[in-house]
Image (cartoon, helix red, strand yellow):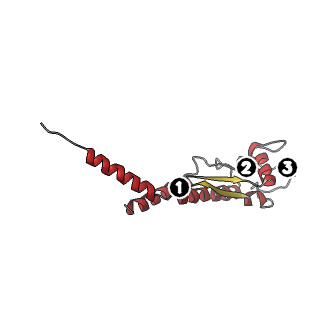
Amino acid sequence: MITIDTKGLAAFLKDLGEKIEKGFDTKNAVTESARLVASLIRRRTKAGLDADVKPFTPYKRGKKGGRVDLDASGEMLGAIEVRVVSDTEAMVGIFDPVQQRKAIVHQLGLGKMPVRRFFGVSRSDVNTLSAIERIFVREMNKAAEKV
């Protein structure tokens, strides 16, 4: 008869997991990821592209003219902020009420404004999503090195 006792291995793995969890800087990973998302939204919008990386609905003829980039004054896109809520949560948003209203009008297409959905991340944002994944892998590796 062969008896296999994994109690020692289970205890070791539990201890290892706890050490890695304590060494993982979630706040740094979440904050850095949120900053990447905010930067993505600003950069893509200034390029005249919506959250699906499609050009914004053009202005009506005779109105404003030129490429639509939602950056006429720079105030709305400049108001995009990152707020760290906890060690595991950060928010990307526009918290200034005036700029928030402008963003909502564009995002939802209220009144006579066409929908110009600029605020968001989509599957087409592969580079940013991959960069976020690399942030978490980097932090995991740093935590593992401390063990």
Quadrant housing the C terminus: bottom left
x, y percent for residue 4 = 20, 41
Image marks 2 and 1: residues in contact by CB distance under 8 Å: no
Residue at 74% x, 54% y: name it. Answer: 95
Residue 134 to residue 109: above or below = below
Please give the label number shown on residue 61.
Answer: 3
Within 10 Å of disc 2 (Cα), the crowding (few <14, some 14-19, many 20+) is: many
> In the shown orientation, is residue 1 left or right of residue 145?
left
Q: Three-letter amino acid code at disc 2?
A: Phe
**Spatial separation of the CA atoms under disc 1 and disc 3:** 40 Å
Q: Three-letter amino acid code at disc 3?
A: Arg
**Spatial separation of the CA atoms under disc 2 and disc 1:** 26 Å
Observer-nearest of 16 and 113: 16
x, y percent for residue 99 = 79, 54
x, y percent for residue 100 = 77, 51
> In the shown orientation, is residue 84 left or right of residue 57?
left
Observer-nearest of 50 and 77: 77
Tag 1 secondary structure = helix
Residue 117 to residue 27: above or below = above
Quadrant housing the N terminus: top left
**Chain-order first, disc 2 or disc 1:** 2
**Chain-order first, disc 1 or disc 3:** 3
Tag 3 secondary structure = loop
Q: Three-letter amino acid code at disc 1?
A: Ile
Q: Which residue is mark 2?
A: 56
Q: Which residue is mark 1?
A: 132
Image marks 3 and 2: residues in contact by CB distance under 8 Å: no
